[in-house]
Image (spheres, rainbow, N blue to C red):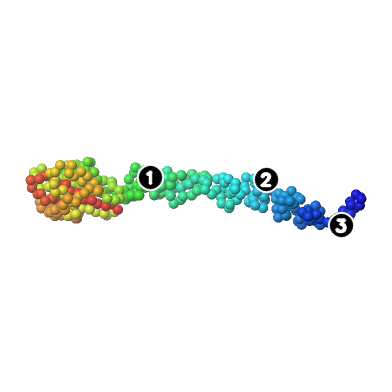
Amino acid sequence: MTRLLLLCALLSGCYIGPIEPGEPTPDPVFPGDDDDAANDDDAADDDDAADDDDGAPLDSDGDGTPDDGDCEPNDPTIYPGATEVCDGVDQDCDSLIDEGLGSIWFRDGDGDGWGDPSTETQACDAPGSDWLGQGQDCDDLDPTIHPGSSVLVDGQDSDCDGALDWQVTLYISGDDAFEYCVDDETSMVPGNVGWQTGAVFTEWMESGDHVVGIRGWDTGMVITAAIAHIETSDGSQWVTDGTWTFDPMPAADDGSRVGWCQVGFDASAWQAANVIGPIGTSPWGNAPSVFPASSPAQWIWDYFPVNLNTQYLRKQITLP
C-alpha cells in the first residue's frame, strides 16, 4: 500500500484525496506552498501567518523593517522611527534631513564678532570660518557697529540697541554766567565763559526724548538772560524761544524742583519764557560770537529782571 501511495503522488494529476477542513489549498505549481507566487518569501506573497513558508517579509539589513517599507533597505541604521542624527542623512525615512537638529549660524561679514541676522541658517557645523552663533549685528558692513560697542558713530545705532546715537552740538551763552545739564541736574556742566563769546559743547544722546536745562545768574542782580542753539548732523535744530519754560520760584529750596532736568518732570507750574529778541538785540548786540551764522536763537529770561540773580530754564527735545 505504501508503494502504491508513493507512486500515486509522483504521477501528475493523481488524486490524493479530499482536503480536510482548515487545510491550505495545495499549490499545483509549487507543491507544499499554499499560495500562487514563485517567491513565497515576498511580503506580497504571504497570505497569512499560517502560510507554510517562513511567514516573515524580507529584511535585508536586519533593522526590523521590511525592505518594502525601508527607505534604505541595506543600511541597518536607517529605517522609519530611527533617531535622527545631525549628519546630513535622513535616518528616520520621513524625507526630511536633520530636522530640529543642528545649531543656528549667522555670517559675520565685517569681522566684528557678530553676525548678520538676515543670514540665519541651521546646520550641524558652521558653513564657513566667518559664520558665528550670535547674529545681532545691525550693520554688518561696519566693524565698529555691533552690540556692546563702545565706539559711538554719529547718526547710527552704534551698539544695536534700537536707538540712533547723535553727537549733539550745543551753543550756549548766559548773562553773566551759566551752567547747563542734559537729563540730570545733578551733573551740571559749567559754562565759565563771557556772555559776549558763548561756548560750544557736545553731548552724545540717543534717539528719543531729552531735557536740556540752563541755570543762569547775573552777578550784579540786574538781568539774567540766556540763549542757546542746539543741533544734530541731520539738520534737526532747537533754539531758545517762547517754548522754553522757567521756574517762577527760583529762590525756592532746591527740593522744590528735584528732577527739573529730567524727562517726566512735572513742569505744569513752570511758565513760558519771556522772549527778549534774537542775536543783535540790545544790550547784547551781535553776541555771542561763537553761534552759527543766522542762528534763529532768541535771548530769553524769566519775568524777574531785577533784584533776583538766578533762573532755571528747561526745554524737552526729541531726537530722531
State the CA–CA distance, disc 1 to disc 3.
93 Å
Q: Position of residue 64 (x, y in %)?
A: 66, 46
Q: On the image, which quarter does residue 257 sit in?
A: top left
Q: Position of residue 161 (x, y in %)?
A: 35, 47
Left or right for 131, reference 195? right
**Which disc, if any, is residue 171?**
none
Say what secondary structure mark 2 lies in.
Answer: loop
Which structural element holds mark 1? Answer: loop
Mark 3, residue position: 15
Q: Nearer the viewer, mark 1 or mark 2?
A: 2
From the top left corner, tell me how far across and down residue 33 is, in percent. 78, 53
1 or 3: tag closer to the N-terminus: 3
In the rendered image, which quarter is residue 176 located in? top left
Q: Residue at x 24, y 46 (%)?
A: 262
Q: Which residue is mark 1?
A: 147
Number of other residues with Cα within 10 Å of mark 3, as a class: few under 14, some 14 to 19, many 20 or more: few
Q: Are marks 1 and 2 in contact (CB under 8 Å)?
A: no
Question: Three-letter amino acid code at disc 1?
Answer: Pro
Q: Relative to the observer, which residue lies in front, 285 or 297?
A: 297
* Frontmost residue, 167 versus 118: 118
Q: What amino acid type should be assigned to the residue bearing mark 2?
A: Gly
- Mark on residue 62? 2
Please name the residue shown 71% across and 53% down the image.
48
Q: Is residue 12 visible?
A: no
Of labels 2 and 3, earlier in sequence is 3
